[in-house]
Amino acid sequence: MTTHNASTVLVTGATGGLGAETCRRLAAAGHTVWMGVRTLEAGYDVAGKIRVDSPDADVRVVELDVTSDDSVTAAYRAVSESGTGLDVLVNNAGIAGRVAAPTDTVPTDFLPVFGVNLLGPVRVTHIFLPLLAQSPSPRLVMVSSGMGSFAVTNDPARIESTLHGLVYPSSKAALNMVATMYAKALPSIRVVAVDPGYTATALNGFSGTQSVEDGTDAIVEACTADSPAGMFIDRHGPVPW
């Protein structure tokens, strides 16, 4: 995999799971990493752990709640005024919501999940777009899921086909559509949606079948590779919509 020179990356939801591991790997590779976090103390803790293994890592913490216009706007000011620029925006923050069978799901179950998983990426992208557009090689990475793929969730060979729910899968399916529309509207920005795979994180009670490092393979590739294998990818290559 051929990669670009060091760039500046902002990752939302950076204090745990896929977000923290993505920050660790990118910082270790020499990229400047902004960790978007809801709680500064937690962010500083993760950043400190990254520096233990990579003392020269340029890891910066910025308070960022993807559900708040004011919070994201303040984060934008902090990043833009720092002078680092922004080359890659990784919309990673996500929640699973209430676990319920489709027949037990009610409309209010959708609100918090769509607020983070769909409206969060739209809010962060909209506010950070002016800074991202100044990069010579801008990238927009949406951390989606195989649960958002109609093909994957209907493939009996995939574990996703056995996981039934209305809310989380539909939020990721909607995010995939948003990604395709951004790609059409922003031809100068490389837009990639990523399926990390069924990764053991707090989102699923650590029931996933692969490690968090494996889960970040496709995210890191989307951030750094000269030619991502497709617009919707996992660690093995293109994912069907």
Image (cartoon, rainbow, N blue to C red):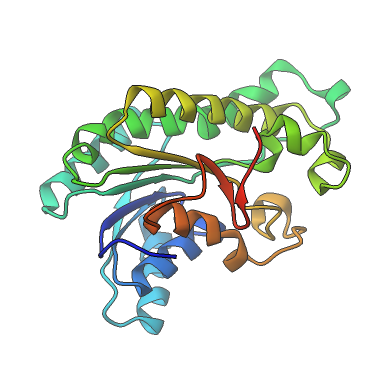
- Residue 160 is left or right of residue 239, and the answer is right
Percent across and percent down for residue 50 are 40, 74
- The location of residue 6, given as percent across then percent down, is 25, 64
Q: Residue at x 45, y 65 (%)?
A: 1
- Front one among 5 and 100: 5
Horizontal arrangement in the rendering, residue 171 relative to residue 3 (left or right): right
Observer-nearest residue: 74 or 177?
177
Q: Residue at x 67, y 19 (%)?
A: 108
What is the number of callouts on the image?
A: 0
Q: Quadrant of residue 130?
A: top left
Percent across and percent down for residue 60 are 27, 61
Residue 56: quarter of image? bottom left
Q: Residue at x 25, y 47 (%)?
A: 137
Q: Is residue 99 visible in the rendered structure shown here?
A: no
Query: Left or right: where does residue 193 sit relative to residue 159?
Result: left
Q: Position of residue 98 (x, y in %)?
A: 73, 35
**In the picture provided, is 117 more to the left or to the right than 96?**
left
